[in-house]
């Protein structure tokens, strides 16, 4: 029986946040804006939460990724990894109890 918890996903987002923040991105750079999106996602994954609540933050994150980030760049690869982890959370939800 799988139950959806976002704590693991939250930890992954926080790890990426800390790694990008450690690079001390320039104010209003793409990496700086990425930090803002990651922080928003981290806040929505704090329990208790719902998949729908997290979905709104992820939609914004994906729009930002599509509009501003080259998929083959290090930031693009980071965004893809975050999204893949989010998709795992959704798969856990689908395989859980109905």
Image: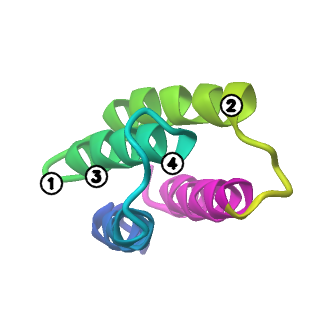
Looking at the image, which is closer to me, 97 or 86?
86
Q: Is residue 90 magenta?
A: yes
Q: CA distance from mark 4 to mark 1?
A: 27 Å
Looking at the image, which is closer to me, 88 or 77?
77
The tag earlier along the polypeptide, 4 or 1, is 4
The tag earlier along the polypeptide, 3 or 2, is 3
Q: Which residue is mark 4?
A: 31
Instruction: Describe the colour scheme in one phrase.
Output: rainbow
Few, some or many residues within 10 Å of mark 2 (<14, 14–19, 20+)? some
Q: Residue at x 33, y 61 (%)?
A: 6
- As helix, strand or loop, the secondary structure at mark 3 comes to helix
Looking at the image, which is closer to me, 7 or 33?
33
Q: Position of residue 57 (x, y in %)?
A: 41, 32
- As helix, strand or loop, the secondary structure at mark 4 comes to helix
Q: Which residue is mark 1?
A: 47
The tag earlier along the polypeptide, 1 or 3, is 3
Q: Is residue 8 magenta?
A: no
Few, some or many residues within 10 Å of mark 1 (<14, 14–19, 20+)? few
From the image, state whether disc 4 or disc 3 is nearer to you.
4
Q: Position of residue 75 (x, y in %)?
A: 65, 57
Q: Residue at x 28, y 52 (%)?
A: 42
Q: CA distance from mark 1 to mark 3?
A: 10 Å
* Side of 21 where 92 appears, left or right: right
The tag earlier along the polypeptide, 2 or 1, is 1
Is the N terminus in the top left, top right, bottom left or bottom right quadrant? bottom left
Q: Which mark is residue 68?
A: 2
Q: CA distance from mark 2 to mark 1?
A: 30 Å
Q: Position of residue 36 (x, y in %)?
A: 34, 40
* Span of residues in magenta: 75-98
Q: Which mark is residue 42?
A: 3
Q: Position of residue 69 (x, y in %)?
A: 71, 40
Looking at the image, which is closer to me, 28 or 16?
28
């Amino acid at each position: 029986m799988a139950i959806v918890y976002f704590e693991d996903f939250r930890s992954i987002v926080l790890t990426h946040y800390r790694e990008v923040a450690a690079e001390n991105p320039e104010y209003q750079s793409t990496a700086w804006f990425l930090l803002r999106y990651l922080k928003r996602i981290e806040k929505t994954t704090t329990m208790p939460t719902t998949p729908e609540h997290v979905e709104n933050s992820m939609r914004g994150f994906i729009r930002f990724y599509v509009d501003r980030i080259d998929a083959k760049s290090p930031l693009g690869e980071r965004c893809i990894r975050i999204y893949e982890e989010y998709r795992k959370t959704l798969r856990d939800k689908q395989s859980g109890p109905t």
